[in-house]
Amino acid sequence: MDEKQRQRRVARDEAAERKRSAHSGFSNPENPRRSWPLTIVVAVFAAYCLFPFVYLLVNATKTQADFTSTFGLGFGHTFALWDNLTEVFSYQDGIFGRWLLNTLLYVVVGAGGATLLAIMGGYALAKFRFPGRRAVFAVVIGAISVPGIALAVPQFLLFAKLGLTNTPWAMILPSLISPFGLYLMWIFSEQAVPTELLEAAHVDGAGEFRTFFTIALPLLAPGIVTTALFTIVATWNNYFLPLIMLKDADWYPLTIGLNQWKDQASTAGGQAIQNLVITGSLVTIVPLVIAFLLLQKYWQSGLAAGAVKE
Amino acid sequence: MSAAEVSAGPSPKVDSVSVNKHRVDWRGWKFLWPFVVVFLFVFIVPIVYAVFLSFFQTRMIGGTVFVGFQNYARLFGDGQFWGSVWRVTLFTLVQVPVMLALSALLALALDSMRLHGTRFFRISTFLPYAVPAVVSTLIWGFMYGAKYGLVGSLNSWMGVHLDVLQPSVLLASIGNIVTWEFTGYNMLIFYSSLSTIPHSLYEAAAIDGASEWQIVRRIKMPELKGSLAITVIFSIIGSFQLFNEPSIMQNMVPGNAITTYYTPNMYAYNLSFTGGQSNYAAALAIVMAVITMAVAYAVQLNSMKEQMK
């Protein structure tokens, strides 16, 4: 079924639902019994959540001198956003651009791979009863509770032995595994892919992979978007893994690079470049914020996997 | 297998069906093997390796030697280690309940459909999750600054001397950053589990004369319990691993308020990457993994008991 048709059906269902709840006069979106006091309480919390974004946006427009001398939430004497942006991308021979490309590489290969492995693994756990299934699940769930550091130290030593540290592989390989993604796809496959449909395809002579690609994958789309978004965030925002694995600034992702720029102010003789740190931070979060806003509908429906009512 | 063969009747149709039912089905592995292979390489092998490493010690004379449980014995009497464990325990005891209570209340408010602009609030409270720990710590760190940060501006404006980076409140300031980062994320987990409640249940309750508050207490809260177990466990694991925020803040804080053994993870990191004591760090990592899993397991048991009632 194509996405448009599905959306239309969902919209129709929602309209019917609203009509019914309007009839019973309870908890319904068309009913004007909305509460201003409750809205204000939530608005205060939303302000707390959005406030640092405002701070970041305002301060990205300031020069280094204005940043240290003018009020934190007010604008500076000169509007330097464009100057800052140019400087971010040209400072130290434009290494920021390199960091951005590195991050993209890690996200595309690492998070993309993690999503693919999670889809296939989750589908297998949900739709097949094979020997070792329970053991795999127990071990993977147990692995979520292993602290990152318990893993990172031996991972580093192991990777060093194999000559993988300080190469993109050190960042990509561990990113390929997302236990949470596997769990999400498992729950989602269970609900979104009817077993009867798979059996029917099988009877018609379709192979295992053909059934997977032509029947299961389209049904899994919202779950895939959700899993992809979570693995992308995890990889894009990862700080700890590259911190231990990468020594060469040419392979840094944005997070490590930014922190290095921040530390520059506190090293002896280092030039304080807080204006670049702030503008660079803004550049770092903008793609993710946009992705979240644009794909809102998909990841929210994906996360509420069981929300298929009645 | 043998049962299938015995029960196989003369009709070929019955035969194929019963054989299919009892034959061992390996097909799932066709899809699962890539995950398992990488998982073995990046999870299982390193964990086994860490256990192995923890039984050795590198000495000036004699190189790396097998020392049995000596690293563990040393850890047992290591005040810096237990100090760091106590610090993250304290952090967990305060930060996790505050954050999860906020998340649950927010989810209930958003789900009540009584807000103006539900969609706006849903996305804006979740947005901090998209911000890397580095960036959120940087922003909050700049704002906390008493010299030219927002706190500094506030001080000179109101003539007070607030310092949210002094050692006695530092942990709370870090807690604020973590709360800011993850409240929306947990809210979303609660919110999506609330959205699985069929609306017919609300209608039925309303017809039976239930008030909105009764519906929250009797229908919504029990539904939240299931996701509460997940969020509690994830949050405990997260706070026991506290590393990014304090280590990024380390040189934004005056003096030595954030030590190299501020949290267990920072201690392990510094031991192995600047102190050259990988074996001791491996032992520390394993002890922390065991403690974390024990706590997570105990909480899980508790929440299961709750649901049994």
Image (cartoon, coloured by chain):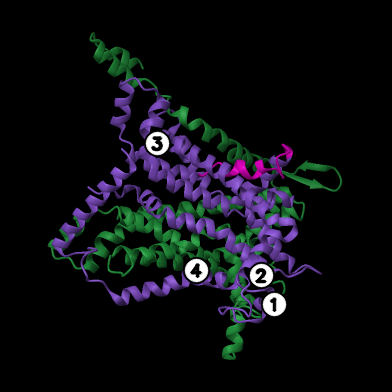
Residue carrying label 1: A65
Over which residues does the magenta segment extend?
A: A161-178
Q: Secondary structure at mark 2?
A: helix
Residue B102 visible in the shown view? yes
The verdict on residue A249 being magenta is: no
How far, Cα to Cα, is label 2 from label 1?
A: 9 Å
Name which residue type carries label 4: Val
- The green-tinted chain is B
Residue carrying label 3: A217
> Cβ–Cβ below 8 Å for labels 2 and 3?
no
Image spot of residue A162 (x, y percent) = 72, 36
Foreground: B222 or A117? A117
Q: Quadrant of residue B224?
A: bottom left
Task: Tell which tag, 2 or 4, sits nearer the viewer.
Answer: 2
Residue at (60%, 63%) from the top-left corner?
A281
The residue carrying pointer 4 sits among few (fewer than 14), some (14 to 19) or many (20 or more) residues within 10 Å by Cα, namely few
Task: Residue at the far bottom: name it.
Answer: B159
- The purple-tinted chain is A
Q: Along the polypeptide, which appears first: circle 2 or circle 3?
A: 3
Residue carrying label 2: A275
How far, Cα to Cα, is label 2 from label 4?
A: 34 Å
Name which residue type carries label 3: Leu
Q: Along the polypeptide, which appears first: circle 1 or circle 3?
A: 1
How far, Cα to Cα, is label 2 from label 3?
A: 45 Å
Looking at the image, residue A191 lies above or below residue A132: below
Q: Secondary structure at mark 4?
A: helix
Labelled disc at residue B94: 4
Image spot of residue B246 (x, y percent) = 63, 65
Looking at the image, residue A31 lies above or below residue A73: above
Looking at the image, residue A93 lies above or below residue A201: below
> Mark 3 falls within which chain?
A
> Mark 1 falls within which chain?
A
